[in-house]
Image (cartoon, helix red, strand yellow):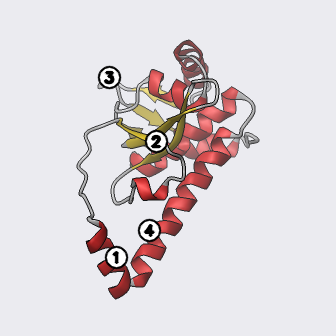
């Protein structure tokens, strides 16, 4: 996992997106001047030289369109989550989104390896690590997630969706 970040107007860290295997991420896709990238897990990236990208686009124009549409979709998914006003459902929606994108399906749950820390999650949704920890306890009591011995999480996405949290 990789996240793109920038500084907000008040100097706070803002997450622009969370990216994974197969996603195309580059400076050309960002209209902001000051964008950084932070690895949240082990990342292997390939450099696509502009010449190669232009050549690929001319030979296979659908490739760049597909990558661009996927980038827009991921950004819109992130915006939808981050616009949730209440922190409790905001964090739950983020966990479901991350689990479905980056986790491993295991029957009724998704297993999410411990790549994301509570600090990472708090920075993404704009709160404190302590608040995320408090919500984790509440989610565990409600059996919406379970912390496993290897520090990974079991996230019960379907159960979370059924409780119908508003954005």
> In this image, 97 relative to 59: left or right?
right
Separation of residues labelled 4 and 3 (CA atoms)? 37 Å
Q: Is residue 56 above or below residue 10?
A: below
3 vs 1, front mark: 1
Separation of residues labelled 2 and 3 (CA atoms)? 36 Å
Q: Quadrant of the N terminus?
A: top left
Instruction: Give whichever of discs 3 and 1 has the lower sequence position.
Output: 1
Q: Could you say which disc has been placed on residue 35 in the image?
A: 2
Q: Pinpoint residue 49: horizontal percent, then vertical percent.
A: 26, 65
2 vs 3, front mark: 2
Taking the image as drawn, is residue 94 in sight?
yes
Q: Which residue occupies the extreme front position in the image?
A: 33
Taking the image as drawn, is residue 156 in sight?
no
* Rendered residue at 44%/68% (across/down): 67
Nearer to me, 167 or 104: 167
Instruction: Give whichever of discs 4 and 3 has the lower sequence position.
Output: 4
* Rendered residue at 41%/53% (across/down): 27
Instruction: Give whichever of discs 2 and 4 has the lower sequence position.
Output: 2
Q: Is residue 134 above or below residue 15?
A: above
Nearer to me, 3 or 50: 50
Nearer to me, 10 or 100: 10
Q: Is residue 62 above or below residue 165?
A: below
Label 1 element class: helix
Return the residue at label 3. 149
Nearer to me, 126 or 165: 126
Return the residue at label 1. 54
Q: Could you say which disc has been placed on residue 154 in the image?
A: none
* Rendered residue at 73%/39% (across/down): 165
Return the residue at label 4. 67
Q: Pinpoint residue 153: horizontal percent, then vertical percent.
A: 42, 31
Q: Residues within 10 Å of mark 1 (few under 14, many from 20)?
A: some
Badges 2 and 1: C-beta atoms under 8 Å apart? no
């Amino acid at each position: 996992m990789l996240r793109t970040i920038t500084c907000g107007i008040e100097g706070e860290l803002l997450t622009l997106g969370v990216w994974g295997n197969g996603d195309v991420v580059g400076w050309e896709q960002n209209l902001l001047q000051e964008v950084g990238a932070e690895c949240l897990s082990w990342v292997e990236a390939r450099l696509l030289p502009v010449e190669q990208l232009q050549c690929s686009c001319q030979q296979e124009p659908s490739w760049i369109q597909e990558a661009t549409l996927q980038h827009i979709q991921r950004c819109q998914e992130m915006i939808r989550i981050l616009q949730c006003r209440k922190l409790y459902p905001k964090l739950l929606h983020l966990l479901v989104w991350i689990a479905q994108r980056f986790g491993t399906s295991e029957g009724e749950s998704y297993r999410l390896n411990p790549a994301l820390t509570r600090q990472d999650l708090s920075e993404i949704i704009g709160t404190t690590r302590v608040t995320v920890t408090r919500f984790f306890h509440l989610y565990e009591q409600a059996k919406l997630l379970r912390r496993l011995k290897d520090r990974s999480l079991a996230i019960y996405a379907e159960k979370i969706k059924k409780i119908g949290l508003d954005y």
